[in-house]
Image (cartoon, rainbow, N blue to C red):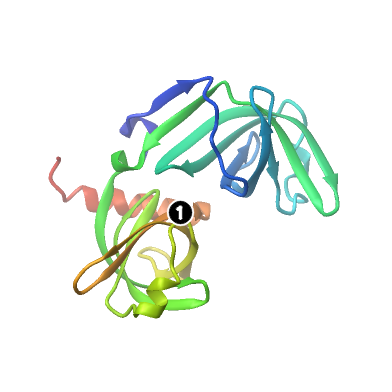
Amino acid sequence: MSDQDLKIEERQGQRLHLELGTPMMLSLEGMDAQVRSVFVGMEVDKYFILSLPRISEFQDLLYPGNLAVLRFISAGKICAFETEILGLFYKKPVRALYLAYPPKVEIVNLRQVPRVDSYLPARTVCRENEVKGAILDISACGIRFGSTQCNEEELSAIKVDDPVVVSCQFPGLAEVQTLQCIVRNIRIGESMITLGLAFSDVSPDLFSAIDDYIKQVSEFLPDD
């Protein structure tokens, strides 16, 4: 799925409204993959701070001036911006990356992202409760998970914004895949409970497989 397939809104000089601990995907100039990072602070119009995982594999790319792209989900929208590194603070256990505050942010409403039906057996784990069910539809940004086996105790333990781990066998990939997600909505039907889940961390290989799956299924669907 290319950016040309989506209606992207650009907002200039926007104040970012983010909760501490928001998961973000970071890519750097010279890096083939993305790494998971966490938002820990900012000063508006000056800098933006991330907490990094182990940096040994890409430490050579963390120099001032190198270009960086951040992607994250906020208020039901995909947000992305390009910036540059200002500096790195590294003193165990703190690994903080300082980035220039973005002059503009690109925003895509998740409803504009292509979504296709699927019936993939899966299980979720949230707050140590395991629920078996199926992935009912999927997009590049998230999934809808449904279950007829969720009891009241398990349901009451799940809240919006909770982290959820989903495991499933995905077409085109041999191993069972693990999806790190965030609960966006909970719907209680007469016979099924459904969870709207947004991806918080997806490996490049899995993201590519999801994108290919959506494209292949979309070829056989009528245009809206």
Question: Along the line of sight, which residue is nearer the eye, 150 or 215?
Answer: 150
Q: Quadrant of residue 48?
A: top right
Q: What is the crowding at mark 1: few (fewer than 14 residues within 10 Å), some, or many (at least 20)? A: many
Q: Is residue 224 left or right of residue 128?
A: left
Residue 100 shows up from this direction: yes
Q: Quadrant of the N terminus?
A: top left
Residue at 37% x, 29% y is 8
Question: From the viewer's perspective, is residue 209 above or below residue 125?
Answer: above
Disc 1 is placed on an element classified as strand
Residue placed under numbered mark 1 in the picture: 199
Question: What is the total number of numbered labels drawn onto the structure image?
Answer: 1
Image x and y of residue 139, in percent = 34, 51
Query: For the residue marked with disc 1, what is the amino acid?
Result: Phe
Residue at 15% x, 41% y is 223
Residue 178 shows up from this direction: no
Q: Quadrant of the C terminus?
A: top left
Query: Which residue in the rendered view is the most extreme toward the right?
Result: 91
Q: Quadrant of residue 69?
A: top right
Q: Is residue 38 left or right of residue 127?
A: right
